[in-house]
Image (cartoon, rainbow, N blue to C red):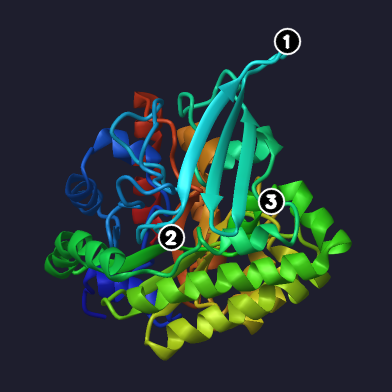
Amino acid sequence: MKRMSSRERMMHALSCDPVDYTPCCFMLLHGFDEWFPGEQNLVAAQADLGLDPLVDIPSWSVSRPGDPLDLRGYQLDYPGKVNVTLRGMPVHAHRDVTLREWRELGPGARYPVLHREYLTPAGPLTVSANQTEDWPYGDHLLFVDDFIIARATKTLITKPSDLKALAYLLQPPDAETIAHFRSSSESNRKLAQEMELLRVYQWGVLADMASWLCGLQELIFLTADQPALVEELFHMIADWNLARMKVVLNEGIDLWVRRGWYEGSDFWSPALYRKFIFPHLKKEVETAHARGVRFGYIMTAGAMPLLDMILEARVDVLIGLDPVQGGYDLRETKAKAKGRMCLWGGVNGSLTVEAGTPELIRETVKSTMDILAPGNGFILSPVDGIYDASDRVRSNVRHFIDAWKECR
């Protein structure tokens, strides 16, 4: 077989078609960000290592300066980077929404409490969270963020009347948003074309957004106590997501990725998944396919009980197969998905690659390739990625890449 470009190789893998060799593409790149700062440097460095890098369309711009939902700020632990909870097209609130923030320290309280209130024409929405020692955003809360879930003393959405106000925050893309998206995409689109790399949009969202708004545990309780509220909330998020998605799909991407870290069976039973999540997933896949775009779904844990439904939805690639911390049975997953859905991942990032020995890394890569590579439809990656940027881990990444090259 003739040698493929990186984009050809990835597209063939996503379609479960024959490839010149099994691609390796790191699904997340936190460690790489520190080794090779700057988006174009990051992409070029991966290509130099022989990997098959993604190019994000657009870049990491995620908000509009001055908007109440601005997600860019307050990254005190990560200077110069943006919050990437909702990376991709900018988010914005209705022009009539204003913002109030304050901080309180009650008598005898262990932590100060941060408050953020959105004043909308349909009433206020307030979120509050403990400002723990590891809080990364100074004296501020963001619109949505993983840090809030575990520290919230009051979540944003608790009752049906909150949804009328939420509609003023989940606004469809307006002309300014679309123009910003297109202008911020141009340099990356040219980069992908010049280097013949896969163009990807990250991320679509549903239950992850609902979890940020309601709290993870609280959201599952609401499915029993107020199922109509959850259904209406999911429809609202899905409609907002689809409005954004339809703009992106017309801009020349190869792969749309939906984040589902909070959609696995660690949180949702198969019955709840079928009722609340599956219909929206299926519609999203159909929307991507109607525009000739592949659909990726990130679920790093809790996927096994849901695998049949993910296949039924016709997802093109399941991203984040982790056999160590994610509960994936690689042989069973391959047997079910073979020829129907590409699989992406296969090796635990933190315990195997970051903390492992060179021998463990090589043995794991070889066994993973032996299980998942035959029959096409596999992309190798540490899951979720590499977070430690130490010299030892950088050496381990080299061992990982060398092992892949030996058996690809």
| Image quadrant in which the C terminus is located | bottom left
138 w.r.t. 21: above or below? above
Q: Is residue 122 visible?
A: yes
Indicate which disc residue 348 carries. none
Which residue is located at x 76 percent, y 61 percent?
268
Q: Residue at x 69, y 51 (%)?
A: 214
Identify the mark at residue 94; answer none if there is no mark: 2
Count the marks: 3
Instruction: In the rendered structure, find residue 214 and report the number of the disc placed on it.
Output: 3
The answer to whether mark 1 and mark 3 are in CB contact below 8 A is no
Residue type of the residue flagged with mark 2: His
Q: CA distance from mark 1 to mark 3?
A: 27 Å
Contact, mark 1 vs mark 2 (Cβ under 8 Å): no
Q: Rate crowding at label 1 as few (under 14), some (14 to 19) or many (20 or more) other CA atoms within 10 Å.
A: few
Q: Amino acid at mark 1?
A: Pro
The kind of secondary structure element at disc 2 is loop
What residue would you read off at disc 1?
107
In the displayed structure, would residue 160 be above or below residue 146? below
